[in-house]
Amino acid sequence: MKKIIVGNMKMNVLSVQERDQYLKSFKKELIRKKIENSEIVLCPSAIHLENFGKTLGKRVLLGGQNCFWEDGGSYTGEISPLMLKNFGCAYVIIGHSERRKYFGENDASINQKVLSSLRNGLSPIICVGETKTERQSGETMQVITRQVKAAFSGVVLGKLEKIIVAYEPIWSVGSDAIPTSNEILEAKVLIQKILARSFSQNVIQKMRIIYGGSVSVKTVKQACIDSGMEGALIGRESLMPREFLKIVKIING
């Protein structure tokens, strides 16, 4: 199974000059590191998507950081899955912890976005994970179970392999602290068991489950390799092409 490494660039790259410098550096590092087998996805802010696509070509896939559930209409400030698809995206991040925390996204709205993304030919990257309080209260497994069941409600079997699940413990994001490899593996196995109850076991084994939360060169072995994950969702390190592609190289083996 091909590993996937997703760069969530968040609300960064604030000018044309910064964007052009980033892309120049990324292309240089991509050639220098001779990365061939991994699937690389970059998710810049929507205003940069078209330029990223033209500059990086087919070697790097594009993803949106979020989407709305309608294809178009009077929804000021929103971006639809159809827009993302038409501007070159293959993926979209849905349910990121920052969307849940700052913008009030809940299980129901996340499910709507998943279904709309699939309908429009995008592969959703669904983020699930517990807060620090939930972890301390021993609720990690209950939280993951609830979020996964809700996100996959109404998904048909034929679409399942298009979906990626990112286990993203909220307390880990931006903290430099990560769960142990065994804890991450436990989360992966739980996600597979939840989905196996509703879908074919054979299809579940073909799905990619990745880890997100303070992934760096120092933590990637524990977070993504020792835990048996199929890739990573990377935040701040995705803003540094050299470090990001070092992580890709490590995951790629």
Image: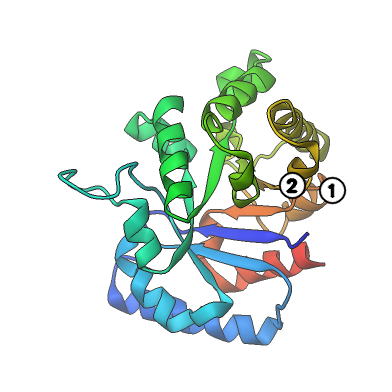
Secondary element at image label 2: helix
Label 1 CA crowd tier, 10 Å (few <14, some 14–19, many 20+): some
* Quarter of the rendering containing residue 128: top right
- The number of numbered badges drawn on the structure is 2
Residue at the top extreme, as displayed: 137
**Residue at point 50%, 64% (across, down):** 42
Quadrant of the snapshot with the C terminus: bottom right
Q: Nearer the viewer, residue 197 or 52?
A: 197
137 versus 222 height, above or below: above
Evaluate if marks 1 and 2 touch, with contact meaning CB atoms under 8 Å apart.
yes
- Is 27 left, or right, of 69 in this rendering? right
Query: Is residue 196 or residue 217 the one in the foreground?
Result: 196
Q: Tell me the residue that label 1 is attached to.
A: 226
For residue 32, above or below residue 123: below
Q: Position of residue 16 (x, y in %)?
A: 29, 76
Rate crowding at label 2 as few (under 14), some (14 to 19) or many (20 or more) other CA atoms within 10 Å. Answer: many
Callout 1: SS: loop
